[in-house]
Image (spheres, helix red, strand yellow):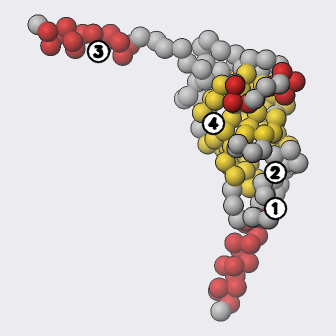
Amino acid sequence: MNKLLLITLCITLSFIKTADVINWIKTEPYVTFDWLDNDKQSLTIVNGDNTIYKSCALTNGTKTCYGSCTGTSTVKCEFEGKNCRADSDNPTFKYYYTTYCDTSDDIKAKGGSVSDYTDVGVTVAISNSNFIKYSMVLLLSLLVL
């Protein structure tokens, strides 16, 4: 009898709907920005049931860049390459940013630390796109040898 009660309790708890911050199925968890072709790149976050995010920012601990966001149920934020730079001294290295969002219209204007906002679980890899050129030159020089 105790086993049946325990199984019933576990099944019931597994079907309880939790408050989703974002829609994990429709939001891409890993995005790459490469500034070679476009000066602006966009990121799309599909809001969950209870929270409507209006503004987002990317941070890697030392650098924070703010996006221009539009939308309600699906928020599309556009980031400019000049604001979210990778390190030009290390062209082959990608920098990984965590995405934070808030229900306010503008995180930057609201102030405070970005870590005070909600981490939506989206990782953005940013490179300055020179790594492609250097990799190709290295590959071609190895083929010539």
Secondary-structure class at tag 2: loop
Q: Secondary structure under badge 3?
A: helix
Task: Please say whether residue 106 is visible from this viewpoint.
Answer: no
Q: Amino acid at mark 4?
A: Val
Instruction: Answer whether labels 4 and 2 touch (C-beta < 8 Å).
Output: no
Residues under numbered marks 4 and 3 in contact, where contact means CB atoms less than 8 Å apart: no
Q: Quadrant of residue 78?
A: top right
Q: Which mark is residue 122?
A: 4
**Which residue: 61% across, 23% down?**
22
In three-dimensional space, the C-alpha distance between marks 1 and 3, rounded to whole angstroms, equals: 53 Å
- Pointer 2 residue: 85
What's the CA distance linking mark 4 and mark 3? 30 Å
State which quadrant residue 76 falls in. Answer: top right
Give the percent coordinates (x, y) of residue 107.
Answer: 81, 25
Mark 1 or 3, nearer chain start: 3
Q: Check the image and name the residue furthest to the left.
A: 1
Place of residue 50 in the rendered image (x, y in percent of width and height, measured from the top left): 62, 12
SS at mark 4 in the image: strand
> Is there CB contact under 8 Å for labels 2 and 1?
yes
Q: Quadrant of the N terminus?
A: top left
Q: Which residue is denoted by mark 1 in the rendering? A: 88
Q: Looking at the rendered structure, which numbered label has been put on residue 10?
A: 3
Q: Say whether disc 2 or disc 3 marks the residue closer to the N-terminus.
A: 3
Q: Does label 4 or label 2 sit earlier along the sequence?
A: 2
| In this picture, residue 138 sits left or right of residue 21 | right
